[in-house]
């Protein structure tokens, strides 16, 4: 791959992802398969390269939000099991069959649609029945699990490949509600087994549950955020593995100017220089995923130092005060997320400043930001999705 021409880039460290996947596999242990959740373009990291590395590092399943995401993985030649975690509209069911995907269902009516599609495709489909144990989003209620499984079992072209649930607060300090959800899930699995319904795979754990709730590991775990190097819990446990952040979002200084005291910067003139300042303009803005909420609040790294964002973040440009940094030149690197020298700006830091979570900070890195892949230990890993 030729280097992108745009200096604003997201550098993705595939070795970091491999290390994080290995850490997840280590926690899961021999009894639980690992599904690498690569939805939303692998949380902004690039689904195809991440999926390849995750599978090479020990994951055996992939999780996508919708069949269109899985189609991209199949087009790249990825043949592993892929579970579609989200709900689908009837028009999307054909993709599930065409790409031989596993589909999560929350309602037997969805299973009926999939069975009809599978019949005409001439290929049976594997379904994972989702149980709502407390997330309150999708899934059948505990009361409905038995009848739903019976209706699915009676359909000609689908089979129940798994029973799953999702935790609402496995990252919380108080483990009580997650334990309650797990107990409800156990009630559901026991009831189905007692009714003679085979359940090949039970799965529930996201990253936080994998770290905090060993009982939730079951037959398979579904980590997402930890594979990208962000810790899912506010407080780290002493035995938690060290996770390596995989995304570095960087640009360069594109313009420098001296701003006299009293001069203003950007739309709305929210920043007025209290004294003579040196201002650098960066060719990155909210259209690239640098949150406008960072206006006058965030920092970036230049010359190994933290420098403040001044004035409003624009769609394509952002200004920073580099007065304290000696010898800044046009072309110098500016880091928006990641390390430079001994300093680091984490996705969690930006999330805290902008009232969100690391997940959104990572997913927000825009489609027009080229991804560049680095991998020392995976020399033949792709440098671009193919
Ligand atoms: C059903 C399901 N399983 C697993 C995950 C992975 O969660 P996390 O990124 O918190 O590990 C998600 C992500 O939202 C999900 O929706």
Image (spheres, rainbow, N blue to C red):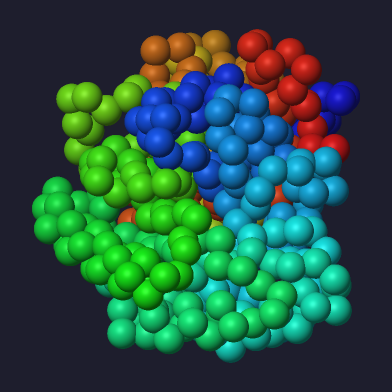
The vertical placement of 112 against 121, above or below, is below
Q: How many marks?
A: 0
Q: Position of residue 26 (x, y in %)?
A: 39, 26
Q: Is residue 379 left or right of residue 163?
A: right
The vertical placement of 71 against 302, above or below, is below
Q: Residue at x 22, y 24 (%)?
A: 239
Q: Residue at x 21, y 62 (%)?
A: 183
Foreground residue, 366 or 63?
63
Q: Residue at x 49, y 39 (%)?
A: 34
Q: Quadrant of the N terminus?
A: top right
Can residue 287 be seen here? yes
Q: Position of residue 99 (x, y in %)?
A: 79, 59
Q: Residue at x 49, y 82 (%)?
A: 150
Foreground residue, 180 or 376?
180
Q: Position of residue 242 (x, y in %)?
A: 34, 22
Foreground residue, 203 or 259?
203
Q: Position of residue 228 (x, y in %)?
A: 49, 36
The vertical placement of 176 against 130, above or below, is above
Q: Is residue 93 left or right of residue 219?
A: right
The vertical placement of 299 against 153, above or below, is above
The image quarter containing residue 193 is bottom left
Q: Is residue 380 left or right of residue 42?
A: right
Q: Quadrant of the C terminus?
A: top right
Can residue 311 be seen here? no
């Amino acid at each position: 791959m030729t280097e992108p021409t745009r200096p604003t880039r997201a550098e993705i460290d595939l070795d970091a992802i491999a290390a994080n996947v290995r850490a997840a596999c280590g926690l899961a242990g021999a009894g639980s398969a690992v599904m690498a959740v690569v939805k939303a373009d692998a949380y902004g990291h690039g689904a195809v390269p991440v999926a390849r590395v995750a599978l090479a590092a020990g994951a055996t399943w992939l999780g996508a939000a919708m069949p269109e995401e899985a189609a991209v993985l199949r087009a790249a030649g990825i043949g592993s099991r892929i579970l579609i975690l989200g709900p689908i509209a009837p028009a999307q069911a054909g993709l599930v069959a065409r790409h031989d995907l596993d589909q999560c269902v929350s309602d037997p009516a969805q299973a009926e649609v999939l069975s009809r599609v599978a019949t005409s495709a001439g290929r049976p489909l594997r379904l994972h029945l989702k149980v709502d144990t407390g997330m309150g989003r999708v899934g059948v209620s505990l009361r409905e699990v038995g009848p739903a499984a019976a209706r699915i079992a009676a359909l000609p072209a689908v089979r129940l490949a798994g029973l799953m649930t999702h935790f609402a607060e496995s990252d919380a300090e108080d483990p009580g509600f997650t334990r309650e959800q797990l107990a409800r899930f156990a009630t559901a699995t026991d009831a189905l087994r007692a009714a003679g319904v085979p359940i090949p795979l039970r799965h529930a754990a996201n990253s936080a549950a994998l770290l905090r709730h060993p009982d939730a590991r079951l037959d398979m775990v579904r980590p997402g955020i930890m594979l990208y190097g962000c810790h899912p819990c506010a407080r780290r446990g002493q035995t938690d593995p060290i996770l390596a952040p995989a995304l570095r979002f960087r640009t360069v200084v594109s313009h420098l100017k001296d701003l006299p005291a009293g001069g203003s910067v950007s739309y709305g003139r929210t920043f007025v220089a209290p004294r003579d300042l040196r201002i650098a303009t960066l060719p990155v803005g909210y259209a690239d995923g640098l949150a406008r909420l960072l206006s006058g609040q965030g920092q970036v790294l230049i010359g190994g130092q933290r420098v403040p964002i001044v004035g409003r973040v624009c769609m394509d440009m952002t200004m920073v005060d580099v007065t304290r940094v000696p010898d800044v030149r046009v072309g110098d690197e500016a880091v928006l997320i990641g390390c430079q020298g001994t300093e680091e700006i984490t996705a969690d830091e930006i999330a805290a400043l902008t009232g969100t979570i690391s997940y959104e900070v990572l997913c927000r890195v825009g489609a027009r930001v080229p991804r560049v892949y680095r991998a020392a230990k995976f020399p033949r890993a792709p440098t671009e999705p193919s």
